[in-house]
Every structure is written in C-alpha cells, then in structure tokens.
Amino acid sequence: LNKEQVISMLDRVVVPGTGRSLVKMNLVRDIRISDENIDICVASTGLIEPSQKSLKQSIQSSLDDSTRIKVTFENVPTGTVNQIGKVIAVMSGKGGVGKSLVAGLSAIALRRRGLEVGILDADITGPSIPKMFGVQARPSGTDSAFLPPTSRSGIELMSINLLLASEDDAVVWRGPLIGQTITQFWEEAVWGKLDYLIVDLPPGTSDAPLTVMQRLPVSGIIMVFTPQKLTAMVVKKAVNMARHMEKPILGVLENMSYLYVPQINKRMNIFGESHAAEMAQSIGAPLLAQLPIDPELALLCDEGRLEQYMNPLIEEIGKGIVESNI
Amino acid sequence: LNKEQVISMLDRVVVPGTGRSLVKMNLVRDIRISDENIDICVASTGLIEPSQKSLKQSIQSSLDDSTRIKVTFENVPTGTVNQIGKVIAVMSGKGGVGKSLVAGLSAIALRRRGLEVGILDADITGPSIPKMFGVQARPSGTDSAFLPPTSRSGIELMSINLLLASEDDAVVWRGPLIGQTITQFWEEAVWGKLDYLIVDLPPGTSDAPLTVMQRLPVSGIIMVFTPQKLTAMVVKKAVNMARHMEKPILGVLENMSYLYVPQINKRMNIFGESHAAEMAQSIGAPLLAQLPIDPELALLCDEGRLEQYMNPLIEEIGKGIVESNI
C-alpha cells in the first residue's frame, strides 16, 4: 500500500454528519506508512466523541489490512481545514427576485460539473435554502466547530433554519447579532475543500451584505434582477454598494423574464419588457442567463426537489461562473 | 366672520411644500376674533422663513377683510401638531411579495373614501413608494422638523429616496442608523392630522420592523404573502414576530394569486395553488383581498401612476381596513 492508495481509500470514508469523504472534508492531516504500521492522523475539528469512534471504525474497515492501521485525532482550527476556492455572493438589493433560487441553481450547476460546492445562507431572517433542497438535518458539531449537512447531490448547506426548533420560528435580532451569525457560519463551519462557496444574501444593503463583503473573501458577485423598472432602481443601489466595497460583479441574471403559455405557444412579459441586455451593459458584467417564470420550478422549490430541475439554462449559469476571469 | 368661517377659509390655504391645507396640517394654533382684529396664530413647525412669509400672504388674501388679519407664528414640537388616528404596518417577512404595492393600494383605497392618509416608507435600503406614486419632491423643513410631500391625490409620503441625490444611491448603513432614520420619519415629520398612517416595512424581522413595533403606536398589521409555500414559511416567521410583539394582525392579503390569460379566458396558478383561505385561518385574521398578477399594475408602478389603477379589489381593501375593529 502506498500513500496514494490510502488517500483514495479515505476518499470513500464518509465523515458522520456530512455526506462527504474525509479527503473532501480535508480532515486527513498526515499519513505515515511503515512496514509495521499505517499511521493516519485525522483532524477532529467539529467531530463529537461518537463520530470520532465511528470514523475510526470506518477507516479501519476500509482497508483490508486493518490491524496495521493506527488512527489518531488532532483538534485543529477550522481555518486550517477549510480550503475554499472562490466565494461567490448572490445579491440583488431587492427582495423576492429569486436570489435564493439563483444561489441554489448556481450551486447545482457547478456540482453537475463535478465541482465541490457549498452554500452559506446569509439570509438570517428569511432563509429559503434548506427548504429548496429538502434538507432538515441539524448540523452536528462541537463547541467551536460544526459540520454543515449536505444535500442529495452532495452540496454543503449552512442556514439558520437548520438550527431552529421549527422552520417558521422568527429570528427577531438586530444587526450585530445577524452579522455575528454570518461570521460564525464562515469561521466555525467545517466546509473542508470546496471549489466554490455560494453566499445567498438577503435583500437590502445593510448589515448582512456589509458583513459578508467586509469579513468574507468574496471573489465576485452575481446580481439578480427582474424586468420591473422599480426592481432595476433598487438593484442599482446594490450595484453601487458592490462598487463602493470594490467587489467585482461576475455576472448578472434576469429572473422572471417571461412566462411561456403553452396553450397559445407564446411568451408573455407579465412583469414588463425585459431590460436584461441594457442592465448587463450598464452594470458592465456578462448576462449569465434569463430565467423564465416556470410553474415547475416553483413546485420543485416548494417540495425541496430543486436538484431535479432540468433546463439547459442551468448549464449556461455554470459555464458563465467557471469561465469568468474573477 | 365667525370662527367656523375663518377655519373653513384656512382649510383652503395650502401649506407651501405640502399639498395640504393649514387645517389638515393641524398648524392653526389659535383664532381670536374681535371687532378690530382677526388674530391667527400658526405653528411654524417645519416652516422655513420664505414659507412663513408666503403663508402669511396666502392667509391674508384668503379673507376679504385682509387688513383686519394679524398672523403670528409659534414654533411648537411636531408631537403637538401630529394627530394620527391609526398606524397600520404592512409586513411580510419575505421580500418581493408586494408589500409596497399593498401599502400603496391601501393608502389609495382609504384616500378614495375621503380619508386623510400618509405613508411612511420604512424600507430604507430598498424604498419603492416614491417611484410608485411618481413623487420626487424633496421634503422642505427646518433643523428639527420637515414637511412630507404629497402625491397627486393628496397622500403624504416620506421615504429615504426623497432625500438622496440620486434614486439609485445605495444606503449602506448598519441597523442602528436605519432605526434612527425610521424614528425621525415618525417624530420629526409634520404629518398633521391623519386618519391613517401606513408604514411600509422592509423584508425580514430585524432592525426596521423591530424599531417600528417598539417605537410607533402600531394599531394593526397587514400581512402580505403569495401562493408559494416557501413564502408561507417566511411569512409565518413575521406572524410569530408580530405575536411576540403583541401587535394584532388586522388582515392578510394574497398577492400574485393567479394570472388571467385573456387569450384562453383562464386563470393560471403560476406560483402554485392559492393558500389564501388556509393562511387567513391559521393566522386568525380576515382575508382582505386576493390580488392577481396584473401586467397593467406593474406598468403603472413603473410609471409612477399607481393612483390611476382602477379595480374593485381596491375598494375591498379599503373596506376591510376601515371595518376592522382594531
């Protein structure tokens, strides 16, 4: 057995409380192979005692030569474990334009390309991500670190709604506590190795987006809007905030562009004429996609089955993100 | 000339910077009629020097017997001038469900019933009210008090967007400043006599709604939702907040209930089946109306002509509000 073989075996060992492997979670600290022993040092960050035990067993039973394996644990800071490629924030300024939908679809698009992806739901008072993905698992963890659960397709999710007793409990907090919670989701979650972390921002240009732009290494922003001029005005406020904070806009996306009515084989502009091209130009960022109003999409979101949505537009979004030079 | 006659004449004198009369603005402090003189004392609250001069002239020219009239000014606190019947907050928790639209239509409905109405736009980072009403006038005022401009039909409006150099300037403030601004809109605006003040809340259950519920004497809340289950979940958070703050819910309203497609003479449930009756029951408040998706409405909002919208549903909303026992 050489080191590569051990790593490839550890990549099949799932960390309890997550759907991801020891390798993807970046918890393998050290592997030493001698004639007598295979010493594997694992970061115990976020792992409660029973999880450590079950993980030890999984590791030992994953290798034929289990008697040679010695597993030790070492508690390291989450900052040591987390290796996140790019942080992409989905923003709008305006509420109800489909930020969470776009955050979800972006993550799904990247995941379908075989990339490792997580979503940090920074909408503390109106979190939509867990419901869209049908995830209800409570994050497990220790005092200083916790493990985000994963969706069916393996996307890591962290949202306040996973921590509430009931999904409709109100979070009646002023700004500082909201900022603190978002910072904890970033600093204390064991995200492991990710190619992309998508951050779903709430509406507005106040505490939550400020905290995200100041505390997280945001690589780029996806700006979401709808055809209404009223929306465009509020979205421009968000664009001005992003400029002020010197965060590049990776791309823009128009949601609810039109409704296709099959009975008359026609597109209806129910929220007005599209201004997608104009908006993309004035913002100076590529148009990633124009999403229609799709009753199937509303249904899938309500039923927690967003990952089953099939539409070539999703691939367009994924392509736009990975081909962006930011 | 008796006192009633003088009052009815002063009710035709418009206060500069507002579209409302001296009487409606509650600025008449005292009227004394003797054989020689008619002494009129006017509150100068919020009135800059040139406004006071022009107001004096208007008063004198409004009465035939102008030589007898003596106008004096007295600066009193806005709290003395403001006489507001009921404060109604429009809330949802969720963004983009049409809170501002419902706030606007509620004010229009009450105004069409001959009532005196104002709108306090508490959405500081995403203000929509001025654009819907086509109002751009900057509020005039003194250091300690200012006069909200009025819409074409005479609805008083106060919004952060009336104070910005450009309507798409971002307001990148943390919670405390947002709370302070809303408090100023309440305490330092010369609203005068109003039957109803409608407060348009931003999404979420954080600083802005907290400040409004703690600082303003909210009589009741109108809760807005759409057919999506995802929306229902977030709206229930807002309902739980209202209960926690002991503010009664006056009524609920479902927006974007359906789209009427004239070509096929059919209603399409593009955001899912309506849950209006179910929501009203679970919240324990009457259903004020179910608004369809109406492309005309989107257009009127974008063009600042919301007051021209004609639909019997508006009367239903007005009736629901005035007949409510809260």
Image (cartoon, coloured by chain):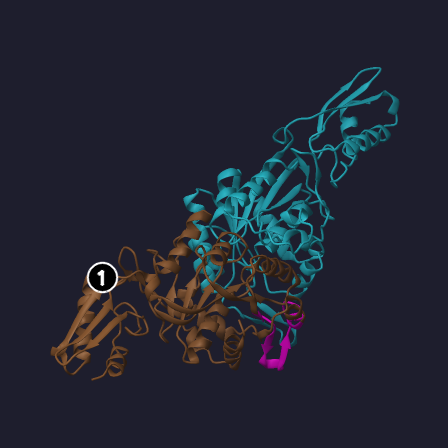
Chain colours: A brown, B cyan
The type of residue carrying mark 1 is Ile
Relative vertical location of residue B165 with respect to residue A188 in this rendering, above or below: above
User: Is residue B325 among the parts visible in the rendering?
Assistant: no
Decide which of A131, A74 is in the foreground and name it: A74
Q: Position of residue B182 (x, y in %)?
A: 57, 42
Residue at image position (54%, 44%) is B177
Residue at image position (43%, 52%) is A178
Locate the N terminus of chain A by quadrant: bottom left
Res A306 quadrant in image: bottom left
Relative vertical location of residue A240 with respect to residue A313 in this rendering, above or below: above
Relative vertical location of residue B308 with respect to residue B257 in this rendering, above or below: above
Residue at the extreme front:
A34
Q: Is residue A50 highlighted in magenta? A: no
Left or right: where does residue B200 sit relative to residue B61?
left
Left or right: where does residue B8 sit relative to residue A23?
right
Q: Position of residue B183 (x, y in %)?
A: 56, 39
* Disc 1 residue crowd, few under 14, some 14–19, many 20+, Cα 10 Å: some
Q: Position of residue B97 (x, y in %)?
A: 54, 59
Relative vertical location of residue A145 with respect to residue A312 in this rendering, above or below: above
Q: Chain of mark 1?
A: A
Decide which of B12, B289 is in the foreground and name it: B12
Res B58 quadrant in image: top right
Q: Is residue A265 highlighted in magenta? A: yes
Element on which disc 1 rests: loop
Residue at image position (63%, 33%) is B82
Res A132 quadrant in image: bottom left
Decide which of B262, A319 is in the foreground and name it: A319
Range covered by the magenta-colored residues: A251-277
Left or right: where does residue B154 sit relative to residue A188?
right
Pointer 1: what residue? A48
User: Is residue B197 among the parts visible in the rendering?
Assistant: yes
